[in-house]
Amino acid sequence: MEASRDPILQDLIHHEKTVVAKVEEARAEAERIVAQARGEARETIERARAEAERLTREIAEGTRDDAAAARDEILADARAAADGLAARATARRDAAVERVVERVLP
């Protein structure tokens, strides 16, 4: 009976070794897949971070340009208003001088 068990036992041992080898291969493959996924995730995060920084710079530059344009427009409007006030003041002064001259010099 022992002789008949030897081949069966040998088959079981061989089968167990095969299964263990396949499990080890699967484990190694799973570790490789996880490592690859982590690497890809790091790359994706770096690309996203770089894109976010680029967009932030673009938005900041655009905002700065918009603010400068608004400032220039406000200054131009203020200068125009000041020029208008100066012109009206000059006209009133001239009118006042003319009235004084008319009254003083008949």
Image (tube, grey):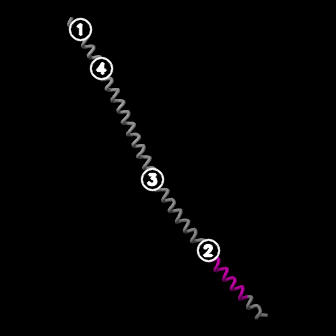
Q: Residue at x 30, y 23 (%)?
A: 86
Q: Which residue is mark 3?
A: 53
Query: Helix, strand or loop at disc 1?
Result: helix
Q: Is residue 7 above or below residue 72?
A: below
Who comes first in sequence, dot 2 or dot 3? 2
Who comes first in sequence, dot 3 or dot 4? 3
Callout in the foreground (4, 2) = 4
Q: Is residue 59 left or right of residue 1?
A: left
Alpha-carbon span between mark 2 and mark 3: 39 Å
Alpha-carbon span between mark 1 and mark 2: 110 Å
Which quadrant: the N terminus?
A: bottom right
Callout in the foreground (1, 2) = 1
Alpha-carbon span between mark 3 and mark 4: 53 Å
- Taking depth in this image into account, of 72 and 46 the one nearest to the observer is 72
Q: Which mark is residue 102?
A: 1
Q: Which mark is residue 90?
A: none
Q: Is residue 45 left or right of residue 66?
A: right
Who comes first in sequence, dot 1 or dot 2? 2
Q: Is residue 12 above or below residue 45?
A: below
Who comes first in sequence, dot 1 or dot 4? 4
Q: Position of residue 105 (x, y in %)?
A: 20, 7
